Amino acid sequence: MQRSTEQNVEPRIEVDLEPIGRRTTLAPGMTLLDAAQRAGVELIAVCGGVGACGKCRVRLMKGELTPPTAVEERTLSRAELAMGLRLACQARPLGNVKVDIPPTSLSTPQRLQVEGQESEVAVDPVVMPVDVTVVPPTLHDLRADTVRLTDALAAQGIPRPFFGQPVLRDLSEKLRAQNWAVRLALRRRNHGTEAVGVLHPDQALLGLAVDIGTTKMAAYLLDLATGHTLAKAGMMNPQIAFGEDVVSRIAYANHHPDGRQALQARLMESLNALLAQLCREAGVAQDQVVEAVVVGNTAIHHFFAGLPVRQLGESPYIAAASEALSLCACHLGLELASGAQVYLPPNIAGYVGADHVAMLLATEAWQAQRPTIALDIGTNTEISLVVEGRLLSCSCASGPAFEGAHIYAGMRAGPGAVEYVQIVGDEVRLQTIGGKPPVGICGSGILDAVAELRAAGIITATGRLQMNHPRAIPWEGGGAFLLAPASATGNGHDLLITRRDVNEIQLAKGAIRAGIEVLLQEAGLTAQDIDTFIVAGAFGTYLDLESAIRIGMFPPLPLERFKQVGNAAGTGARQMLISAARRRLATQIGERVRYVELTVHPGFTKAYMDAMYL
Ligand code: FES
């Protein structure tokens, strides 16, 4: 019997996955988790899709899904269900649907792809282009090149700019090579302008924004006319070779002749390599980059600018300069346009630097009306509390554990890194980046593992491992927990969390929580008064908030009060690159902050001891 063509065609359902912008089709009866897997969207599904982990949350934006299952009703609150939240492994589309995948449900690399939106500020850079064509000299017209140029500018109604020596070295050659037509990059000064670059009339003016962390750096190349980011890239801070934290780098600088110069030179070398990479990717020339903004903590700022650091490393930890600086790139060794300047926004005090100002600027936290905590987690964690127009800030040494350093099987967030852990009875469920067999554990995985070990009673509140658990094994320093046996890993080694790893996490999270508590004490508030809790930084983007709360790193607030905002310091640097108004605002923010020095605060030691408990 012949069947009609229609009967052979299986109905297909279209599923749009936002904000990644992928689309796929499904047969009826398949789940949203199937859709994500088909579309190559790495949704977190630690339990493998059986509805036990609650990690695969998505939000229905358009269309219709099967009614919530009993599992969803148990896992999601009524309010969450009313907002359209569902578990992707449970919900099945009934027709074409569009769903939003929150960053917290995405695997680390995809989560980082969606962070760091373009800056939404009016473009108003301090460097502007002026196209000018100059009359060539003759034996009857012997005016110098700058006079010739100045006269041509005057004919356009533009006052004479200042020409510094670096630009003068370029100018004559460029005028002749470009048939007397140039695009001048003019930078605003207090009085008048300064020529900072001589370009071809077809070349766009570009800017470089850099966020230098103690461990990692992120750089962005922007078009100064549009404010668009043309390329971005990151790399490790090469100063790690001189010490993992800023205190040991300052010690290096103090104890080695030319130590400070060596630290600065290594930084510039890497920044130049990063810049060359960005320019290659964007298909532009390095001398189109006519302005840069660099943010970092105070010590990094001093190393970058070549300022003395000895006094910064000794109590009372005094910065050489805290005001905004504009320094000539060529004097720093940064290979930009000949006269390009590098703008360094103001520092706050101690180790709270311009990177924190940039974060407060980008997130608008500085003008919060209700009590707001804004913190940027890194090897140094800077924390601000904004309350009724007051800004209190502190810095705590949280160490590099969340970067995977000092952790026995620690690694960066790359393929095969365990990023989520679930412990059910004796069973351990792991999710790795890229779904590869585990080879190590990254920051979010360590946080999750410690939270799960504690919830399962395998470690005590003091971090001691219960050695009677079948997965506990003897190990130097108080035992270890077997996350995955060698037979199940990608490198043939047992994957372990050691007692020492747990201790590293206790130290790091204790420092962060103590910093939060001290600021709250200063303001006469308690944790429950916090209305908004902003978590910035790459690690802050992909950490599991529930795990952070469970181990006591963050106070127990409802999840909707938290905002994970990605590299906001980088966004703030980009804003200051394209907008003079944002620079002025950053200066005002820096002036308004009251710095709280934790090491001498009477409440710090107790807060730290209390915060060490899990
Ligand atoms: Fe959906 Fe675990 S994958 S709950």
Image: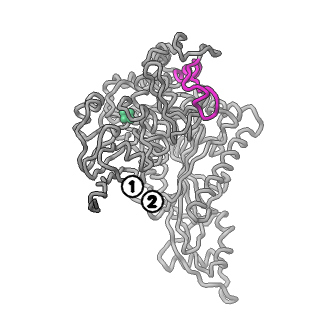
Q: Nearer the viewer, residue 267 or 591?
A: 267
Q: Nearer the viewer, residue 429 or 478?
A: 429
Q: Residue 561 placed where, x, y %?
A: 32, 33
Residue 492 among those drawn in magenta: yes
Number of the label disc, if any, that sits on residue 121: 1
Task: Report if the CB atoms under discs 1 and 2 are less than 8 Å apart.
Answer: yes
Query: Residue 166, located in which quarter of the rendered image?
Result: bottom right
Residue 510 visible in this rendered orientation of the protein: yes
Quarter of the picture holding the N terminus? bottom left
Q: Residue furthest right?
A: 257
- Residue ID for mark 2: 227
Q: At x 67% / y 89%, what residue is drawn? A: 140
Q: Residue furthest top?
A: 468
Q: At x 72% / y 43%, what residue is drawn? A: 261
First in residue order: circle 1 vs circle 2:
1
- Judged from the image, the quadrant occupied by ligand 1 is top left
Query: As displayed, is residue 176 above or below residue 296?
Result: below
Number of the label disc, if any, that sits on residue 364: none
Question: What kind of element bears circle 1?
Answer: loop
Q: Residue 283 placed where, x, y %?
A: 58, 65
Residue 606 visible in this rendered orientation of the protein: no
Question: What kind of element bears circle 2?
Answer: loop
Q: Which residues are magenta?
A: 480-507
Query: As displayed, is residue 122 above or below residue 553?
Result: below
Q: Amino acid at mark 1?
A: Val
Q: Residue furthest bottom?
A: 140
Q: Is residue 592 left or right of residue 256?
A: left
Q: Residue 105 placed where, x, y %?
A: 39, 39
Q: At x 68% / y 53%, what residue is drawn? A: 333
